[in-house]
Amino acid sequence: MPSYPQFNPLRLRSYIFRLPLCTRLLVAAIIGLWVATIPFPWLREVAALTPDKMDLTQMHRLNLFPVMHLNFLHMLFDVFALTPLLERFEAEFGTIVTLSLFTGPFGLLPGGLYLLLEKVVLRSNTTVMGSSVWVFLLLSAEAMKTHKTNPNFSIGPYKIPTWCTPLLLILLTSFLIPRVSLIGHLCGAAIGYLWATGWMKFLVPHEKILRWLETKLNLLGRLPHYVSVDQKTYGRYGVLPSAVPLGTMPRSPEGGQRLGP
């Protein structure tokens, strides 16, 4: 009989407890807003990105549409897909950078591009919501990084560029899953590609400013699971123990003592 991997709740619990701070906050916001729509279903109408309803008084929709979902399954699948990608992004760039991007440009830019295509090019009025726009944004950025070390992958006799993997996934989900926005996903992927090329680094404050802010507010000491922007100095979760050459360590005149039984 073939053996199948067993679900281990302890490993899942350990993974959840190790999630960095911004990932926790964004996932909690997604789940919390879904819970809030149970007694208040009109919240979906307030947060959804609807082209015909956009004006200067409705700019909040550009920030809220990625964290609002149509139903429980929509929210569940997006959370499962987004969490590992978001955790990896935060581990690389830090909590404060991740929070500033995902509460600002990473909602405004794909949402604004979607509105432009829908109203000007397609002249349509399709409403979108859901964090799958972030999923494909992050997948595209990861695909560009992978492309530098592994430019192609093979399917039979064909070699396919690694960078286009998210585009294939977008097409596949559009065919297999009903009511999926092809244009919305492509807009998220487009911003992900731009981010990976480095053309959008101006959206992030200078690293010296972020370091000063972290030090001034003592964010590493005050916020649990905070990820420093300076990975080389502070590591992932603050100051980590460093290796000391044996010759420079102070020696005790007494022999070593074994710990434990």
Image: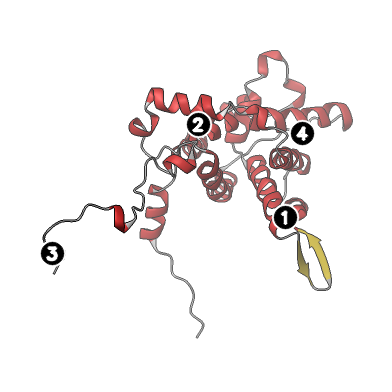
What is the number of the mark on residue 147?
A: 1
Compute the Cα span from label 4 to label 1.
Answer: 33 Å
Residue at the disc numbered 3: 255
Number of the front mark, 2 or 3: 3
Of residue 37 and residue 97, the one placed in the foreground of this image is 97
What is the number of the mark on residue 126?
A: 4
- Please state which amino acid type lies under the numbered disc 4: Thr
Q: Earlier in the sequence, mark 2 or mark 3?
A: 2
- Please state which amino acid type lies under the numbered disc 3: Gly
Extreme residue toward the top, this view: 57
SS class, disc 3: loop
Residue shown at the point (66%, 32%) measured from the top left? 201
Residue 213 in percent (x, y) is at 46, 24
- Please state which amino acid type lies under the numbered disc 1: His
Question: Is the C terminus in the top left, top right, bottom left or bottom right quadrant?
Answer: bottom left
Residue at the disc numbered 2: 96
Q: Earlier in the sequence, mark 4 or mark 1?
A: 4
